[in-house]
């Protein structure tokens, strides 16, 4: 027997209290969202070092059979880099890049953003 | 002697869209308010859909985490409640499907119209009886009647949340109410 009218049932539904969530739910939601510490970004130096190691490994593996050739190539590269003129230019280049990176106004991103305004 | 009377004007409620914008702008208090606002409703939807408080707790948390991660995809012209209810409902459906797969069989909706003995024991008042009656409904009617309760009779919003046509929602609500009436009438007749 359906003795309740539609309005009575609607009123009953409207008066039904919501379920009470567990006490720790609120804190665990916030811990998993707004309070979650983002993962540490990879240091550029670290990324460069890993990239260099990977490149060396990729280059080295096909030459494993010719170990003397590899040693000779590394020795030649080291000798070339050890030339005073090369060392001076490398030092100047690294110093210039480092100085430029510390200047607050010198950023291609900032320049492009301003140009676009 | 003069008596000072302080009448505090009621603070206007910040809109959900404003809270979303604040969160996207880097203010975490916006999302904290949204959690406070919808936590109970989402948990209610999850409890009624899943009929398991532990699973409902996890589904509610999962819904908020998914919403937080994809907040940038929320369209400002959409209704936040519909969006987050939809995320929660789909999280519940995924859990139901998973539990059916792991149990290796379909979990049948209760064939009997009357609530089970446990539900009957706590159904000693109108609210308890209604809660037990909703729990005894088939799954598709449980979700639809819960959203009807939570979203205040907005059929189109319910249709958006569940992803079914408006006509189907109207039919489901009609049938859910019919079954609720029958279950309530049966439980009231029993001692």
Image (cartoon, grey):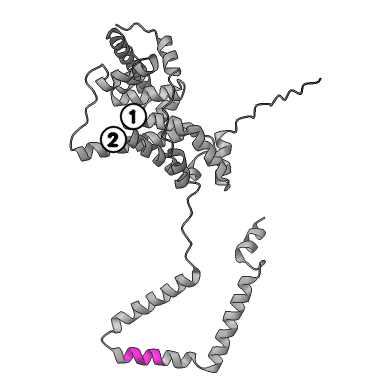
Q: Are marks 1 and 2 in contact (CB under 8 Å)?
A: yes
- Classify mark 2: helix, strand or loop: helix
Residue A31 placement (x, y as % from top left): 46, 46
Name the residue located 36 percent from the left edge and 92 percent from the top edge: A72
Instruction: Examine the image and state in which quarter residue A57 appears.
Output: bottom left
Q: Residue furthest front?
A: B1
Residue B131 among those drawn in magenta = no
| Relative side of B106 to B66, left or right | left
Which mark, residue B33? none
Foreground: A97 or B148? B148
Location of residue B56 with respect to A91 vertically, above or below: above
Query: Spatial distance from mark 1 to mark 2, Cα to Cα?
Result: 9 Å
Disc 1 designates what residue? B49
Location of residue A30 with respect to B147 vertically, above or below: below
Q: Earlier in the sequence, mark 1 or mark 2?
A: 1
Name the residue located 46 percent from the left edge and 25 percent from the top edge: B151
Q: Residue furthest right?
A: B1
User: Can I make out residue B79 in this image?
Assistant: no
Instruction: Examine the image and state in which quarter residue B61 appears.
Output: top left
Residue A51 placement (x, y as % from top left): 42, 73
Residue stretch rendered in magenta on the structure: A69-75
Residue A97 placement (x, y as % from top left): 59, 76
| Image quadrant occupied by the N terminus of chain A | top left
User: Can I make out residue A25 in this image?
Assistant: yes
- Classify mark 1: helix, strand or loop: helix
Question: Which chain is indicated by disc 2?
Answer: B
Disc 2 designates what residue? B96
Question: Which chain is indicated by disc 1?
Answer: B
Instruction: Examine the image and state in which quarter residue B15 appears.
Output: top right
């Amino acid at each position: 027997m359906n003795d309740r009218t539609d309005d009575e049932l609607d009123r009953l539904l409207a008066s039904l209290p919501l379920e009470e969530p567990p006490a720790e739910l609120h804190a665990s939601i916030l811990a998993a969202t707004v309070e979650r510490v983002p993962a540490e970004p990879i240091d550029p130096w670290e990324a460069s070092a890993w990239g260099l190691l990977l490149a060396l490994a990729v280059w080295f593996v096909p030459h494993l059979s010719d170990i003397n050739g590899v040693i000779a190539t590394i020795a030649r590269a080291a000798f070339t880099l050890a030339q005073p003129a090369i060392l001076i230019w490398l030092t100047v280049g690294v110093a210039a890049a480092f100085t430029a990176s510390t200047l607050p106004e010198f950023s291609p991103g900032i320049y492009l953003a301003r140009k676009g305004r | 002697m003069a008596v000072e009377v302080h009448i505090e004007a009621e603070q206007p409620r910040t809109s959900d869209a404003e809270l979303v914008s604040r969160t996207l702008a880097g203010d975490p208090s916006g999302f904290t308010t949204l959690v406070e606002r919808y936590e109970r409703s989402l948990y209610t939807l999850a409890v009624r859909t899943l009929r398991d408080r532990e699973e409902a707790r996890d589904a509610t948390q999962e819904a908020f985490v998914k919403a937080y991660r994809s907040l940038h995809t929320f369209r400002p012209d959409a209704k936040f409640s519909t969006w987050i209810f939809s995320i929660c409902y789909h999280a519940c459906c995924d859990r139901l499907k998973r539990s059916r797969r792991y149990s290796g069989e379909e979990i049948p909706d209760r064939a009997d119209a009357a609530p089970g003995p446990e539900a009957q024991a706590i159904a000693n008042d109108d609210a308890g009886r209604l809660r037990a009656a909703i729990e005894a409904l088939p799954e598709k009617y449980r979700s639809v009647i819960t959203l009807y309760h939570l979203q205040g009779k907005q059929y189109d919003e319910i249709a958006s949340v569940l992803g079914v046509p408006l006509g189907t929602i109207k039919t489901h609500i009609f049938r859910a109410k019919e079954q609720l009436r029958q279950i309530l009438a049966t439980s009231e007749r029993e001692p």
